[in-house]
Image: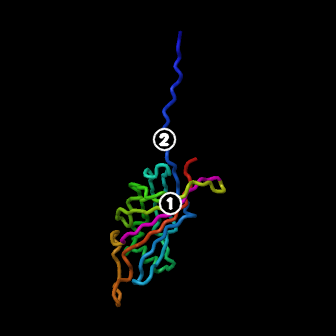
């Protein structure tokens, strides 16, 4: 009597985390900094791109990579924008791209993540922590594409990236604050077929 063995099924592997790309037309990267010790000046970058690998079942395995075109900076004042692009600040002629690469992700509640990574501005790299929040569940848009969204914020000291320029005010204090707040809102589109 011959016994034939039934074929052994290959072991199942965990599904790969989904890959997402930033939809720049429906996203924003803004910043604000204290001006003359009395108000905040806001600006934005209008040209940027990025990729995210994210699985809501395993958020700690997420990876984020983004780049921003420094020359796209806008504060709605041409003279100020020109100064910010100069060697006093971003030095955009020499360093036209700002980058962020995540190193670790730590869940911080049901819809929050601490994204730790390397931010490179004007040739200087420092660790920053993006506080990501309002992470949506995947949805299908009217054109059949899967999307998710999120917001993030971080604060940094511009002096730590070599941006030392300032001017003393007659009444005391300085013209430009050192602490900069960065606010990000992204719409991400599935890069997987």
Residue farthest toward the top in the current orientation of the protein: 1
Dot 2: element = loop
Which residue is depicted at the point 35% across and 78% down?
A: 165
Dot 1: element = strand
| In the depicted structure, whether residue 126 falls above or below residue 10 | below
Residue count near mark 1 (Cα–Cα under 10 Å), binned few <14, some 14–19, many ≥20 = some
Which residue is depicted at the point 54% across and 62% down?
A: 24
- Dominant secondary structure of the magenta stretch? strand
Which residue is depicted at the point 54% across and 59% down?
A: 149
| In the depicted structure, whether residue 170 falls above or below residue 152 | below
Comparing 4 with 19, the one in front is: 4
Are discs 1 and 2 less than 8 Å apart at CB? no
Q: How many marks?
A: 2
Task: Provide the residue span drawn in magenta.
Answer: 144-157
Would you say 148 lies left or right of 89 here? Answer: right
Residue farthest toward the front in the current orientation of the protein: 109
User: Circle 2 is placed at which residue position?
Assistant: 14
Residue farthest toward the bottom in the current orientation of the protein: 170
For marks 1 and 2 on the same chain, the one whose residue lies earlier in the sequence: 2
User: Circle 1 is placed at which residue position?
Assistant: 49
Which residue is depicted at the point 52% across and 19% down?
A: 5
**Quadrant of the rendered image containing residue 159:** bottom left
């Amino acid at each position: 009597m011959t016994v034939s063995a039934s074929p052994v099924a290959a072991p199942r592997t965990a599904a790969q985390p989904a890959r997402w790309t930033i939809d720049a037309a429906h996203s924003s990267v803004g910043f604000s900094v204290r001006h003359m010790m009395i108000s905040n000046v806001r600006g934005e970058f209008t040209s940027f791109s990025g990729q995210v690998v994210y699985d809501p079942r395993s958020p700690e395995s997420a990876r984020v990579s983004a780049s921003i075109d420094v020359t796209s900076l806008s504060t709605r004042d041409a003279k100020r924008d020109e100064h910010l692009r100069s060697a006093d600040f971003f030095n955009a002629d020499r360093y036209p791209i700002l980058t962020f690469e995540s190193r670790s992700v730590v869940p911080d509640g049901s819809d929050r993540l601490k994204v730790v990574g390397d931010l490179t501005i004007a040739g200087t790299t420092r660790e920053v922590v993006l506080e990501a929040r309002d992470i949506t569940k995947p949805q299908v848009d009217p054109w059949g594409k899967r999307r998710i969204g999120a917001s993030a914020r971080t604060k940094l000291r511009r002096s730590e990236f070599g941006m030392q320029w300032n001017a003393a005010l007659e009444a005391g204090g300085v013209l430009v604050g050192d602490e900069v707040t960065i606010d990000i809102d992204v719409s991400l589109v599935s890069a997987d077929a």
